[in-house]
Image (tube, rainbow, N blue to C red):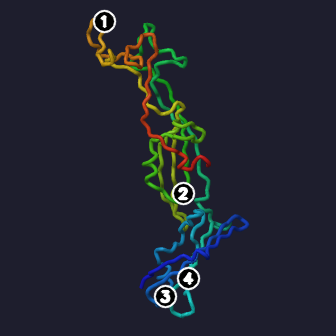
Amino acid sequence: MAVIAVNEQRAERRGREGEQGEREYTRVYLVESDNPDDQEPVILSAEALPKRGDLFAPDPAAICKTRLAQPHGDEATTELWRVTIQFATATGDEQDNPLERPADISWDMAQFREDVRVDEDGIPIRSSAGQPYDPAPQRDQSRPTLRIVRNEASYSASLPVEFSDSVNSDYFFGAAPGVAKCAKIAGRRATEGELTYWVVTYEFHFKHDGWPLRLEDQGTYELKDGKPKQIKDTDGIPITEPEFLDGNGNKLPAEDPPVVGEFRIYRSRAFAVLNLNNL
């Protein structure tokens, strides 16, 4: 005893929206079994049929509420059945649909420390004798953080793989490309009544000057005639402590501020794919 065919009757699709905004959808299937003695439990167990609690893909706020199996045709016993599936959103008397709840959005600040070698006017921070401080002094580096928790119909483990530690290539919550970095995407499965869904948490950090790796140009070698040569002191002895360079491989004059090079170390992704900007 088994179901051998399930075919939707597309001409019998129906949809209705009520006065309170509730929505209902009907889908009809013809189900064929291989035994005329099969009864409703066998017919309704067909894998291809929506199950109670399943989401209605075109409108995920609607779930499968009822399933009705009836013999199709005039014969008392038949291998062909008509199955009517009803999807509906929650009414005012029912528990609200978790997928229709608004996302929880919160902003915060994270505190970090960073090295600083020039002041806000670009003047090198050095001793009265012009010597850089070692170790470098530090300052606070505060970053806005964004946390979004949203109920979603499904969760793909490929999402954090694709977006973790990536920076935005497009505008994101008003931030220019390269300013926001995805710190976390996590999913937790939840069930309410007949509906199973996912609670997905997104976290982002924002840095006003972006996320490149910034390193001061320095070393124990400089370029001479296009080739690296070890820097020597006034006595002709190779130095062991790095000297600041000018960005072109030459020793930096003592009165000049350090030259900082930038290196792109985070991949870029279009955050618009996450569909969060319009929350």
> How many numbered circles does the render carry?
4
Circle 2 residue: 152
**Mark 2 or mark 4, whichever is nearer to me:** 4
In percent of width and height, residue 259 lies at 44, 20
Amino acid carrying label 1: it is Thr
Amino acid carrying label 2: it is Glu
* Quarter of the figure with residue 250: top left
**Residue at disc 2, secondary structure:** strand
Q: CA distance from mark 3 to mark 1?
A: 101 Å
Mark found first going from the N terminus, 2 or 1? 2
Q: Is 37 left, or right, of 9 in this rendering?
A: left
Amino acid carrying label 4: it is Arg
Circle 1 residue: 234
Circle 3 residue: 79
Mark found first going from the N terminus, 3 or 2? 3
Question: Residue 82's mark?
Answer: 4
Question: Residue 258's mark?
Answer: none
Q: CA distance from mark 3 to mark 2?
A: 39 Å
